């Protein structure tokens, strides 16, 4: 994704893994394959390989630079994490942190880290391995966590430290212990033009993040939407959604509301070109990519 601006906020994607193939049968298990095939004209080749039955996901963070602050949203999988042998997450080594530096931002320059939710692929770079222990990657940042999501993950960790691949222990707990965690309500407003909105379903405390500046707006949808096909068919929840019915209802609300606006949409997993708008299309919706 090329840099985009929303008013005086500059937005860049810091990409960890640009194109990960996942079978549609695993990604959206309730999907109708014939309906997916009917969207071939725009799905291929960027977003799917229908001969193989796979959709493509990107894993990336958003770097926001406002006139006052530098903000990171969702920190991907991270390096060196023990994820129980998971084929994609376990022991990953990527150049994500180097790419952040190439974008002109040193870890010490990040003011806020925001996580739409606490699945392992959205909190990994919260911490890094240093001398055998996990330490916050961004030593001067406040890490903004929605209270409902934080408390849900904390309870799960206390009941079973291995829950969620152990991600709470290595990617959230060190931030809490360093005193950098900022626990907020799910409608929190940060510095006047960055705000949270509850978007429950994918996880109990999932949020989306709204940007507003100089009359322009954008929304970072996190995992409320995983793949562009779900804009067309919001009833198809991803296999990773903890409450599929609630997630589907959340996605439909986003479709209906955003299709009536010029709000730029920045999903967490759409492959490049990534950014765009939700538009009404026949009796449904379609994603209109910016690039």
Image: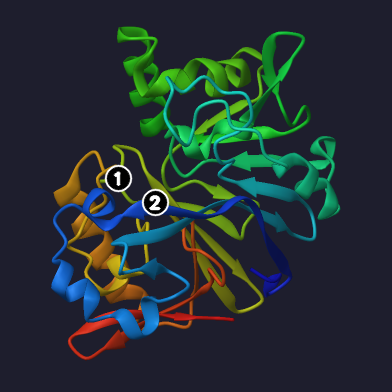
Q: Position of residue 155 (x, y in %)?
A: 33, 16
Residue sitting at x 81%, y 55% = 103
In the displayed structure image, the side of residue 265 where residue 228 appears, left or right: left
Question: How far apart, in angstroms, are the residues tagged by discs 1 and 2?
Answer: 7 Å
Considering depth in this image, is 102 or 190 the residue closer to the camera? 102
- Please give the count of numbered marks on the rendered protein: 2
Residue 181 placement: quadrant: top right
Residue located beneath label 1 in the image: 202
Q: Is residue 74 above or below residue 66?
A: above
Check disc 2 and report its element: helix, strand or loop. Answer: loop
Q: Is residue 217 above or below residue 110?
A: below
Q: Residue furthest front?
A: 51
Residue 35 placement: quadrant: bottom left
- Dot placed on the residue nearer the N-terminal end, 1 or 2: 1
In the displayed structure image, the side of residue 265 where residue 239 appears, left or right: left
Can you say which quadrant of the picture contains the N terminus?
A: bottom right
Q: Is residue 196 above or below residue 149?
A: below
Check disc 1 and report its element: helix, strand or loop. Answer: loop
Residue sitting at x 56%, y 41% = 76
Considering depth in this image, is 186 or 149 the residue closer to the camera? 149
Q: Residue furthest bottom?
A: 282
Residue 130 placement: quadrant: top right
Q: Position of residue 158 (x, y in %)?
A: 36, 8
Q: Residues within 10 Å of mark 1 (few under 14, many from 20)?
A: many
Question: Looking at the rendered structure, which numbered label has been put on residue 223?
Answer: 2
């Amino acid at each position: 994704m090329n840099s985009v601006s929303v008013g005086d906020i500059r937005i860049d994607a810091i990409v960890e893994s640009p194109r990960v193939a996942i079978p549609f049968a695993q990604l959206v298990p309730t999907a109708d394959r014939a309906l997916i095939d009917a969207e071939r004209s725009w799905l291929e080749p960027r977003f799917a390989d229908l001969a193989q039955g796979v959709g493509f996901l990107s894993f990336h963070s958003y770097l926001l630079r406002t006139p006052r602050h530098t903000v990171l949203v969702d920190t991907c999988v991270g390096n060196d994490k023990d994820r129980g042998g998971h084929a994609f997450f376990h022991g990953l080594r990527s150049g994500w942190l180097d790419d952040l530096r190439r974008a002109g931002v040193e870890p010490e320059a990040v003011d806020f880290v925001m996580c739409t939710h606490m699945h392992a692929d959205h909190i990994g770079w919260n911490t890094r391995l240093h001398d055998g222990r996990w330490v916050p990657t961004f030593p001067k940042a406040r890490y903004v966590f929605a209270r409902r999501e934080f408390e849900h993950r904390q309870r799960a960790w206390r009941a079973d430290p291995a829950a969620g691949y152990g991600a709470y222990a290595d990617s959230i707990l060190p931030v809490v212990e360093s005193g950098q965690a900022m626990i907020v309500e799910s409608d929190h407003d940060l510095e006047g033009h960055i705000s949270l909105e509850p978007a429950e379903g994918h996880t109990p405390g999932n949020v989306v993040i709204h940007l507003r500046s100089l009359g322009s707006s954008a929304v970072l949808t996190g995992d409320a939407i995983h793949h562009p096909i779900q804009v067309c068919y919001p009833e198809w929840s991803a296999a990773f959604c903890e409450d599929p019915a609630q997630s589907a209802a959340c996605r439909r609300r986003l479709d209906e509301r955003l299709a009536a606006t010029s709000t730029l949409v920045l999903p967490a997993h759409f492959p490049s070109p990534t950014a765009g708008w939700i538009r009404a299309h026949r009796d449904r919706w379609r994603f209109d990519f910016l690039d």
